[in-house]
Image (spheres, helix red, strand yellow):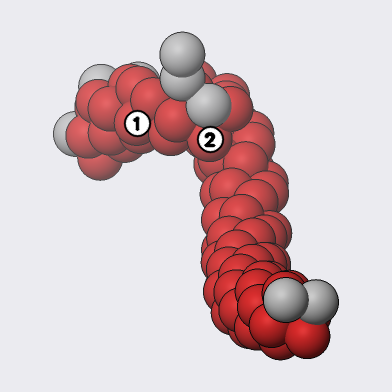
Amino acid sequence: MKTKYQIAKIKHDEAFKAFDLIRNAYRNLEIGDEEFLDAKKVYDMETQKFEAAWKKEIQRQGRLETRLHEVGNAICHWTNTKDRAEYWLKARLTEKAEIENELKLLNV
């Protein structure tokens, strides 16, 4: 599936190719001012659409990069928290076993 930016780029590229042909015909005096200006309006509209889509794409990319950074930090945080929890659990289990052994020795 193509993004709005990709679609706008394709349409802009097509509009440029068409306008380039018109521009060359105008330079060669094969068409008049009105036809040239009409083609330029169409090309300018597609350029504006492309630029708007490009700005949104840049913003989207920035948001995605920011979110990726946030998710990466969260993963590091929870990995570290999990590692600390496992360390303390192991320490408490060891301490529990030691206390139970001492109690067994006292009750013998």
Q: Quarter of the image holding residue 41? A: top right
Give coordinates of residue 27: x percent, y percent. Answer: 25, 40
On the rendered structure, is 29 left or right of 108? left
Q: Which of 17 and 12 is in front in this view?
A: 12
Alpha carbon distance from label 2 to label 1: 12 Å
Judged from the image, the secondary structure of the residue bearing numbered disc 2 is helix
SS type, badge 1:
helix
Left or right of residue 61, residue 56 in this image = right
As shown in the figure, which amino acid type bears the numbered disc 2?
Answer: Tyr
Residue placed under numbered mark 2 in the picture: 5
Q: Which mark is residue 13?
A: 1
Which quadrant of the figure contains the C terminus? bottom right
Position in image of residue 106 (x %, y %): 78, 85
Q: Camera-side residue: 106 or 13?
A: 106
Residue at 39% across / 25% down in the picture?
10
Q: In the rendering, at what x and y percent does residue 97 appear?
A: 65, 74
Q: Which of 10 and 43 is in front in this view?
A: 10
Q: Relative to residue 39, is residue 45 depicted above or below?
A: below
